[in-house]
Image (cartoon, grey):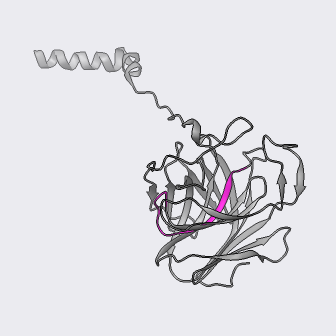
Amino acid sequence: MKAAFGASLVAAMLFAAPHLLRAQAPVATTPSAPALAQPGSATHAQVAPPADFHRPSKNFDTPLGIFDGQSDIGSALLPGSASYDATTKQYTITAAGYNVWYTRDEFRYLWKKMSGDISLAADITFPDPKGYGDRKAVLVIRQDLDDDSKEVIAALHGLGMIQLAQRPEKDVRVKDMEYRVGGRGRPGGANPDSLVGVAAKRIGIEKRGNSFALFVSLEGESMHQFGPPIKLHIDAPFYVGIGFCSHLPDKSDTAVLSNVVLKNLAGKVH
C-alpha cells in the first residue's frame, strides 16, 4: 500500500505539477570575469593574471580538416567551437579568450602533432568588422596543450597588426616583434575608426630547425619573410595548428582561416 502511494505521489509530481520541478532546476550562468581580465580602454588597463592562476585546457580528439584534434587552451569562460567547409577550404573558429600574450593563453586551437621542419600559412578574415581590435587569429607551434606552454605564434590582430611571438619557457610572459602595417585606429585612441594602410591578406610561419620566421602577403603578392626569425628549441613531437582568441574574457567572436597550407618541410610557405 505504501509503495503504491509513493508511486502515485511521484506521478503526480511529474505530470500534474511539472512547474515544481522546473523551479528547482539549476540555472546555467556564465562565470563573471575579473576586472583585470577585461580588455584595455581609456579608463582600464588589462594586466597579467596572478602568478599562480592557471586553468586546465579542454582537449577533444575530434579531427577537423587536416587537423587531428582541438582544444580550448586555458578553458575560457565560454567554450569555443570550429567547423570546416571542404568546398571553400575554410575553417571557421569561434572563441572567447582573455588573451594569448601573458604567462598563459585562452584560445580555441586546431592542432596536429608533428616533428621536424614546418611550413604553415593561411588567409585570415574577421566576419564582424566591428569586433574588438586586439582579437587575434593565430598560427601556433607549441610544446604542449597546457595554458602556459612554450610556443611560437604568428598572429594577425583585428586592427591589422602582425606579430611574431614566443613564450621561451613555461609560465613566463610572451615576448614578441610587432609590425603595424595597417588597420583601424586603436579603441580609446585618436580616430579609432580611421583606416591606415592595409591589413595583411595572408600570414605564415616557417620552422627550420630552431629558427622560426614570419611570412606575410599584404595585398595578394607572393609571401615574403617579415623581419628577422626568432630562435627557440621545442622538443619533438610538438603541436602545430591554427586558432583564435577574441581578447574578451566572456564574449565570443569569430575568425575564418582559409587555404591553409601545412607541410612537414621548411621553404613551403606560400
Q: Position of residue 122 (x, y in %)?
A: 70, 68
Q: Quadrant of the N terminus?
A: top left
Residue at 64 percent of width and 48 percent of height:
247
Q: Position of residue 204 (x, y in %)?
A: 70, 72
User: Looking at the image, is 15 positioned above or below residue 113?
Assistant: above
Q: Position of residue 7 (x, y in %)?
A: 20, 20
User: Looking at the image, is 25 positioned above or below residue 120?
Assistant: above
User: Looking at the image, is 145 positioned above or below residue 15?
Assistant: below
Residue at 78 percent of width and 53 percent of height:
159
- Outermost residue toward the left? 1
Q: Position of residue 162 (x, y in %)?
A: 74, 63
Residue 87 showing in the rendered view: no
Residue 162 showing in the rendered view: yes
Q: Nearer the viewer, residue 238 or 71?
A: 238
Is residue 140 a member of the stretch shown in magenta? yes
Residue interval drawn in magenta = 134-148
User: Looking at the image, is 1 positioned above or below residue 216?
Assistant: above
Q: Image quarter for residue 124?
A: bottom right
Residue at 49 percent of width and 46 percent of height:
50
Number of numbered discs present? 0
Q: Nearer the viewer, residue 244 or 258?
A: 244
Q: Quadrant of the C terminus?
A: bottom right
Is residue 48 a member of the stretch shown in magenta? no
Q: Is residue 105 left or right of residue 154?
A: left
Q: Nearer the viewer, residue 171 or 58?
A: 171
Q: Is residue 61 left or right of residue 228?
A: left
Residue at 29 percent of width and 15 percent of height:
12
